[in-house]
Amino acid sequence: MTSIYYQANRSYPLTQSEQEQVAQILKECEKSYPFPERGEALCQYSYDPADPACIFSGSAKLPYPYDDDEADDETMEMQTEALFFLIEWLTSVRRVIPDAQWDASLENVELIWDEENGYRLMTNEEYEDYY
């Protein structure tokens, strides 16, 4: 299964307003996620007091084939649609917590943050330079 992972760090916890806004975004994301039977929308992991700087973290799973050997065109199309859907919602969450240090990736490939447009995938050139 392919997943998106994200984490926000800063020196103080989420404010009440931030918590409420993030909860609303996550609720709306889950409600409108196009493939709930084959993947998972953005979620929030429980706060870990052992890592107080991590104020928000979670993951989302892209649609997966019913059978591990079934990586067909339909699944690939669903994964692509879900990826762009989830990136848009993750951008919304990040905009609620703009002063944190964020890390977001599709598996082990970093998502790129663009202040004007939000998260995006790496270009081929950026990917080649990354590795």
Image: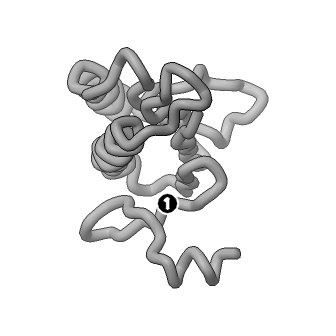
Crowding around mark 1 (Cα neighbors within 10 Å: few <14, some 14 to 19, many 20+) is many
Using the image as rendered, state which of residue 85 and residue 65 is in the foreground. 65
Residue 49 in view: yes
Judged from the image, the secondary structure of the residue bearing numbered disc 1 is loop
Residue at 44% of width from left, 25% of height from top? 39
Residue at 49% of width from left, 29% of height from top? 64
Residue type beneath disc 1: Leu
Q: Quadrant of residue 1?
A: top right
Using the image as rendered, state which of residue 57 and residue 14 is in the foreground. 57
Residue at 34% of width from left, 31% of height from top? 22
Pointer 1: what residue? 111
Height in image: 47 above or below 114?
above
Return the x and y of residue 66 as percentages of the image width and height.
Answer: 50, 20
Using the image as rendered, state which of residue 79 and residue 113 is in the foreground. 79
Height in image: 61 above or below 130?
above
Return the x and y of residue 55 as percentages of the image width and height.
Answer: 56, 37
Q: Quadrant of residue 120?
A: bottom left
Q: Is residue 112 left or right of residue 77?
A: right
Return the x and y of residue 21 as percentages of the image width and height.
Answer: 28, 31
Q: Quadrant of the C terminus?
A: bottom right
Q: Quadrant of residue 5?
A: top right
Colour convention of the picture? one colour
